[in-house]
């Protein structure tokens, strides 16, 4: 997950994500209607052509209702005054691993009878000092390199549907992470806050194109999109 989207996810204001539908190679121009009623878990969508014999199904590659997704984000291993920690760049949160039994082993010679077991963290490097990383561009690891155990956000899929990307409502645009402008009350902005827009949907259009235009799936093309609706599992939240 890109850094700008982590904060609204933690705040439970981002509860939607849209991903362009990938059609089979034989479909050159998918001018079809969609139908999902036969798949209540959202795992597939049927696309119907103008003639009854024209149809095919597409499987949702992101899971089905009830599945859990763990989120990767920009992070780093670092040393702190309280021992090894995982740092999360989005909000400078520190996860102190010495406070979690899963990373400790019994050692009668250690103070308190427990010591940190580095073998349980794989190859994570904790040599950097946390204070030297915060506010800096260097030293952080990209989200793709985050191991499962270091993730602090787990999402549960509660709904999946298919729609054209231009059919998004202002309400759903806000659920995609669009926010009210900090500078002008009647305007909206993408999470990076660079440009103001008159409606949430206009701001989402910019967000969509920033990700999908180069892949030939721009807003103007109006592609089909999987709409994944999720909730963050609060019991797994490690953010203070």
Image (cartoon, grey):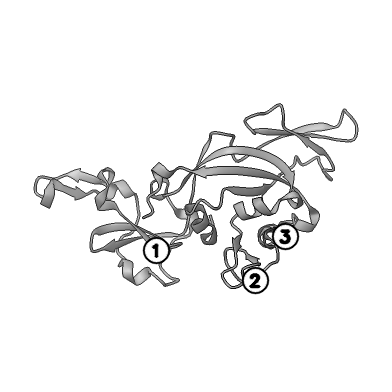
**Is disc 1 surrounded by few (<14), some (14 to 19) or many (20+) residues within 10 Å?**
some
Of badges 1 and 3, nearer the viewer stands 1
Real-space Cα distance between discs 2 and 1? 25 Å
- Given residues 198 and 153, the one toward you in this image is 198
Q: Are marks 1 and 3 in contact (CB under 8 Å)?
A: no
- Given residues 4 and 72, the one toward you in this image is 4
Where residue 15 appears, as percent x and y from the top left, is 57, 48
Q: Earlier in the sequence, mark 2 or mark 1?
A: 1
Where residue 122 appears, as percent x and y from the top left, is 34, 49
Q: Which residue is mark 1?
A: 92
Asked if residue 216 lies left or right of residue 188, the reply is right
Q: Quadrant of residue 85?
A: bottom left
Q: Give the quadrant of the C terminus.
A: bottom left
Real-space Cα distance between discs 2 and 3? 18 Å
Of badges 2 and 1, nearer the viewer stands 2
Label 2, secondary structure: give it. Answer: loop
């Amino acid at each position: 997950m890109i850094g700008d989207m982590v904060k609204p996810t933690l705040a439970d204001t981002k509860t939607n994500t849209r991903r362009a539908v990938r059609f089979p190679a034989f479909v050159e121009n998918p001018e079809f209607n969609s139908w999902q009623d036969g798949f209540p878990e959202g795992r597939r969508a049927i696309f119907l052509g103008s003639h009854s014999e024209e149809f095919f199904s597409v499987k949702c590659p992101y899971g089905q209702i009830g599945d859990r997704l763990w989120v990767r984000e920009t992070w780093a291993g670092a040393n702190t005054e309280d021992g090894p920690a995982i740092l999360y760049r989005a909000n400078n949160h520190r996860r102190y691993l010495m406070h979690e039994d899963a990373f400790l082993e019994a050692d009668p010679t250690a103070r308190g009878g427990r010591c940190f077991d580095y073998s349980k963290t794989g190859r994570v490097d904790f040599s950097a000092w946390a204070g030297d990383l915060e506010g800096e561009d260097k030293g952080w690891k990209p989200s793709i390199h985050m191991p499962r155990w270091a993730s602090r956000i787990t999402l549960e899929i509660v709904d999946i549907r298919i729609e054209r990307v231009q059919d998004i409502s202002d309400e759903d645009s806000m659920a995609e992470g669009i926010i009210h402008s900090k500078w002008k009350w009647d305007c909206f902005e993408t999470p990076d806050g660079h440009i103001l827009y008159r409606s949430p949907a206009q701001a989402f259009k910019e967000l969509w194109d920033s990700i999908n235009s180069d892949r030939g799936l721009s807003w103007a093309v109006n592609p089909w999109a999987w709409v994944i609706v999720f909730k963050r599992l609060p019991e797994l939240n490690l953010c203070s």
